[in-house]
Image (spheres, grey):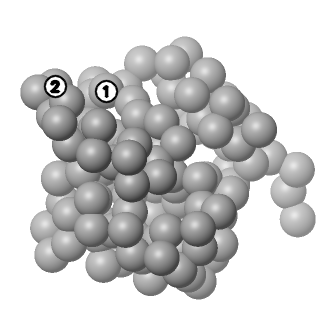
Amino acid sequence: MTDRPTVLLCDDSRALRMLTARQLADCGFEVVGEAGNGLEAVAQYRRLRPQLVLLDLVMPECDGRQALRDILAHDPAARVVILSSLGAENDIAECLRLGAKSYLQKPIDPAAMARVLHDASA
């Protein structure tokens, strides 16, 4: 058992997941699972019950918005932080209305990520 906050990392880019996992570890988080699409994200959340979810919006099979809805329907207390590309302001606002705790803009700034995730896990 770890005392570091656990994170489920969801993004369709394997390279981004690898980079972000290293950054998360450097910031004191433990990546307990990864997902490459929204369906995997929901399944992994149900199986792993991480303290935080870092969720990309644009993914195949089921986008991040729908995955957010499904995760929160399963667990209304889930702490989800959205990953977004530039130009997705309307999507970000919708996700915050749906219950996401915060968002991070891509490319991810490691210091901002640490701050946002520590706030979301508090």
Q: Is residue 7 shown above or below 40?
A: above
For residue 26, say whether it is visible: no
Residue 118, position in %: x, y?
A: 69, 32
User: How far from the left and from the top, in percent, is residue 39?
Assistant: 30, 78
Dots 1, 2 in contact, CB < 8 A:
yes
Answer with left or right where residue 12 lies relative to residue 42: left
Label annotation for residue 105: 1
| Earlier-in-chain disc, 1 versus 2 | 2
The amino acid beneath tag 2 is Leu
Q: Position of residue 86 (x, y in %)?
A: 16, 25
Seen in the image, is 102 located left or right of residue 85?
right
Q: Nearer the viewer, residue 120 or 112?
A: 120
Residue at screen point 40% across, 43% down:
96
Q: Is residue 29 left or right of residue 16?
A: right
Element at label 2: loop
Give the class, few, some or many, for how many residues have Cα within 10 Å of label 2's Cα (few <14, many ≥20): few
Front-most of residues 91 and 27: 91
Quarter of the figure with the C terminus: top right
Residue 119 lies, with reference to residue 71, above or below; the image says above
Secondary structure type for disc 1: strand
- Give the residue drawn at x 20%, y 42%: 91
Task: Give percent across and percent down for residue 90.
Answer: 17, 36
Provide the residue designation for mark 2: 86
**Neighbour tally class for label 1: few under 14, some 14-19, many 20 plus, Cα within 10 Å:** some
Residue 118 disc label:
none
User: Is residue 101 in view from this perspective?
Assistant: yes
- Residue that appears at 59% across and 53% down: 79
Amino acid type of the residue that numbered disc 1 sits on in the rendered structure: Gln
Residue shown at the point (58%, 68%) measured from the top left: 76
